[in-house]
Image (spheres, rainbow, N blue to C red):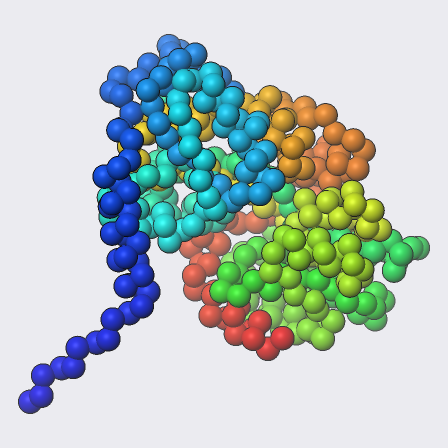
Amino acid sequence: MRPPRPRPPDPRRTAHAALAALLLTAAACAPPAEPAGIDLGSGPPRAGTVRPGALDGTAMTFVSYGGSYQKGQEEAAVHPFAEESGARVVTDGPTDYAKIAAQVEADAVTWDVVDTDAIWGEAHCGDLLMPLDFTAIDTAGVPEGLVGECTVPAMQYGMVLAYSTRAYPDDPPTTWADFFDTRAYPGKRGISGIPNDPAPGPYEAALLADGVAPGDLYPLDVPRAQDRLDTVRGDLVFWETGAEQQQLLESGEVDMAMVWSGRAYAAADNGAPYAVSWEDWLPVMDSLGVVKGTRNPRSAMALINYYLGADQQARLTELTSYSPIHTGARPALDATAAEFMTTAPGRADRAAPVDRQWWSANQQDLVQGWSSWLAGR
């Protein structure tokens, strides 16, 4: 009997192993772990505060997605935290889930606090992210339902229906049913088309348009949603990035679009003639978590606690246009920016619920079906 042939090396495993080797080398040169017995002060934590000089001698890393968003995070929270606490905080990015996994697998963690997609954060609680220490983090100002065992929200935005006020001056579309009604509302529609990355938005909108009540969306009936999406396939224009969303609106290539509220605001602020309907908008958020195996757990908790402060959140909103996650935040905004806040009075009551736990448990199972549907575009 002939012996089995050896399997050729998986290039993904080879790349992963190479990255792990690099991480081990980097870890050997990493700064020392935080000093033992860090004193963050007596009494319960207060969001937005840190004991002056509490982290002298500590070196840590904050990781996010780059661009104006990360610059806003740094100016609003990360740099002031470093100045007050005495910690040396290095910023890195963009967030890369493969790098996080490789660091944890190699026991060579060099990233501490990371900004991630909320669904990914929930899905990897306990294996790639560590449970948060809520004796050091004050979440009293965070709206109910947004805090997880391993994550807190980093900011909020929404998936909304944006429409051209020129294309529909008198009777604009206001519901997802209108989005799918090409007879009453002819024109091109923009929609997410990110391969291998199904996310809240298209499926929920399709089911709402097909008559499913917001409270009955989950578990998602994916075949029904795809059938409904098929009815407008010929009118769809697909975007894969936030910049592409904004460009579709500013160029007038689409008459309506399912986009992130922040990108709709940026387009409107640049003069694009688009408005937003908030009927059954879909809440979205990023999360902050701490990489499992960090050498700086107490320092990481202190940074997250500081980030959640009302003043820090107000400043972050002013710098980025994302909605704050502290209920006491009072950002100074002009009328246009205020109109695009998901936290505007009464707006939460009009949202369709997004079940992040369902998504975190099922997202990987949806990849093949979503990619196959997109391939037919």
Q: Position of residue 79 (x, y in %)?
A: 50, 25
Residue depicted at x 45% and y 46%: 95
Q: Position of residue 277 (x, y in %)?
A: 77, 49
Q: Residue furthest bottom?
A: 1
Question: As drawn, is 133 to the left or to the right of 154?
Answer: left
Question: As drawn, is 109 to the left or to the right of 375?
Answer: left
Q: Quadrant of the C terminus?
A: bottom right
Residue depicted at x 30% and y 17%: 38
Give whichever of 212, 257 is nearer the camera: 257
* Residue 343 position (above or below residue 173): above
Residue depicted at x 13% and y 82%: 4
Give whichever of 94, 312 is nearer the camera: 94
Question: As drawn, is 208 to the left or to the right of 255?
Answer: left
* Residue 64 position (above or below residue 171): above
Question: Can see residue 175?
Answer: no
Q: Position of residue 332 (x, y in %)?
A: 72, 25
Residue depicted at x 52% and y 61%: 198
Question: Can see residue 113?
Answer: yes
User: For residue 269, what is the image quadrant?
Assistant: top right
Q: Residue furthest top?
A: 42
Q: Residue furthest left?
A: 1
* Residue 4 position (above or below residue 167): below
Q: Quadrant of the N terminus?
A: bottom left
Q: Position of residue 254 (x, y in %)?
A: 77, 62
**Number of marks drawn:** 0
Give whichever of 45, 28 is nearer the camera: 28
* Residue 262 position (above or below residue 162): above
